[in-house]
């Protein structure tokens, strides 16, 4: 039971970190475009 909950949270964390790195990539591109 606990493992299932933990697994779900782990998936959400993975998704979040992927979204964050995608946003960082976008921000980096934006900065490159400005310079």
Image (cartoon, rainbow, N blue to C red):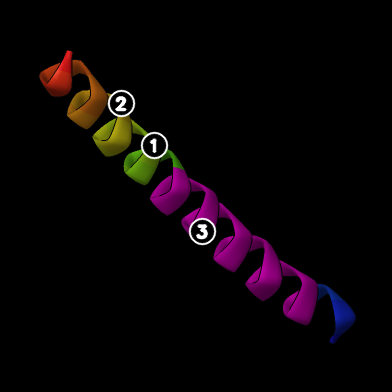
Look at the picture and state if 5 lies above or below 32. below
Farthest residue toward the bottom?
A: 1
CA separation, marks 2 and 3? Answer: 18 Å
Q: Nearer the viewer, residue 23 or 31?
A: 31
- Mark 3 or mark 1, which has the lower sequence index? 3
Majority secondary structure of magenta residues = helix
Secondary element at image label 1: helix
- Residue 22 x/y as whole percent: 34, 42
- Mark 2 or mark 3, which has the lower sequence index? 3
Secondary element at image label 2: helix
- Residue 21 x/y as whole percent: 43, 39
Residue identified by numbered label 3: 16
Q: Which mark is residue 24?
A: 1
Look at the picture and state if 20 lies above or below 6. above
Verify CB contact (< 8 Å) between mark 2 and mark 1.
Answer: yes
Which residue is located at x 64 percent, y 74 percent? 8
Q: Which residues are magenta?
A: 4-20
Verify CB contact (< 8 Å) between mark 2 and mark 3.
Answer: no
Which residue is located at x 40 percent, y 52 percent? 19
Q: Nearer the viewer, residue 24 or 31?
A: 31
- Does residue 18 appear to the left or right of 6 in the view shown? left
Quadrant in the picture for the N terminus: bottom right
Quadrant in the picture for the C terminus: top left
- Residue 17 x/y as whole percent: 53, 49
Farthest residue toward the left?
A: 33
Tell me where residue 10 sits by quadrant.
bottom right
- Does residue 26 appear to the left or right of 9 in the view shown? left
Q: Nearer the viewer, residue 9 or 25?
A: 25
Q: Nearer the viewer, residue 29 or 13?
A: 29
Q: Is residue 30 shown in magenta?
A: no
Residue identified by numbered label 2: 28
Secondary element at image label 3: helix
């Amino acid at each position: 039971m606990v493992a299932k909950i933990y697994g779900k949270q782990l998936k959400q964390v993975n998704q979040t970190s992927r979204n964050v790195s995608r946003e960082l990539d976008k921000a980096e591109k934006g900065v490159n475009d400005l310079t």
